[in-house]
Image (spheres, rainbow, N blue to C red):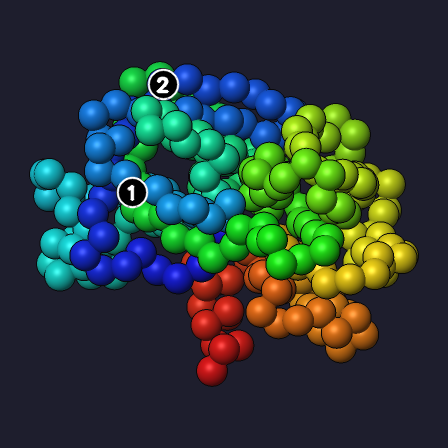
Amino acid sequence: MAEKSERKGRPTVRLTVLRTQQLTPHMIRIVAGGDGMSDFRPNDFTDAYVKVLFPLPEVSYPEPFDMAAIRAEYPRDQWPRMRSYTVRGYDGHELTLDFVHHGDEGLAGPWARRVQPGDELLLSGPGGAYRPGEEADWHLLVGDESALPAIALSLETMPADVPAHVFVEVADAAEEQRLDTKADARIRWVHRSAGESLTDAVRALEFPAGTVQAFVHGEAGFVRELRRYLLDERAVRRDLLSISGYWRRGKNDEEWRVEKAAEKR
């Protein structure tokens, strides 16, 4: 979920990993807590995201860890790497994040695979912008694994019997998760291994009558296609559409951040 850079002046939260859980073959849950939880300020968004900080092993950083000092005193190529992750759960004592892991590829996934209870987790945030509202007659939730934590939390917060259509793209049936909700949710799992298309699945939906609030997040390719479809063909209200590319296929987080910023110019 790479969005804006960590805001200047936002304190770094230092947590301790308490436990890990292998949710599916490629999804790892990290639960953290400790004294640093007193520095975490939650918000009310169901897509609340934090910036997880990964210090470079070859660089010595100030102690206590201070991102403002690092920005002021260190060249940019020595700043810790950042990855954005949706807060899957928070109860005042523990913070839960879910990480997608694909072997040794990438930065955060391999870290989540090898991290142990007692290790440190550095983060800042949270940010966020979406929460299911009461104005909508029904809800549309669309995303891949990167958006699954936000989709799951959104479903958990919906009131009883509110209509929701949910489309989640994962590798195969082994990556499906139980999604708890009181809403009247129709959940469709789209499997990449079977050649299924998330865009096609959404286009095949017969839209119910009434006002829709939509949440569409994940890989930039399908997000772009669905943005055009929802705005131009379905006339979804812009103020009720939360839509963003969290990542782009073939790009690492830093490359995608630069490309995304250039597209907004």
Secondary-structure class at tag 2: strand
- Looking at the image, residue 8 sits to the left or right of residue 176; the answer is left
| Residue 22 visible here | yes
- Looking at the image, residue 169 sits to the left or right of residue 125; the answer is right
Question: Given the image, on which type of amino acid does mark 1 rest?
Answer: Arg
Mark 2 lies on residue: 18
| N-term mark: 1 or 2 | 2
- Asked which quadrant contains residue 33, the reply is top left
- On the image, the x and y values in percent for residue 13 come to 25, 39
Question: Given the image, on which type of amino acid does mark 2 rest?
Answer: Leu
Give the residue at x 71% y 69%.
Answer: 236
- Looking at the image, residue 52 sits to the left or right of residue 101; the answer is left
- On the image, the x and y values in percent for residue 52 come to 36, 43
Q: Nearer the viewer, residue 246 or 214?
A: 214
Secondary-structure class at tag 1: loop
Q: Nearer the viewer, residue 238 or 263?
A: 238
| Residue 58 visible here | no
Which circle marks residue 19 in the picture?
none
- Asked which quadrant contains residue 121, the reply is top left
- Looking at the image, residue 72 sits to the left or right of residue 88; the answer is left
Q: Nearer the viewer, residue 183 or 153?
A: 183
Give the residue at x 45% y 39%.
Answer: 87
Crowding at dot 2, Cα within 10 Å, few <14 / some 14-19 / many 20+, comes out as some
Q: Depth-wise, is mark 1 or mark 2 nearer the camera?
A: 1
Mark 1 lies on residue: 41
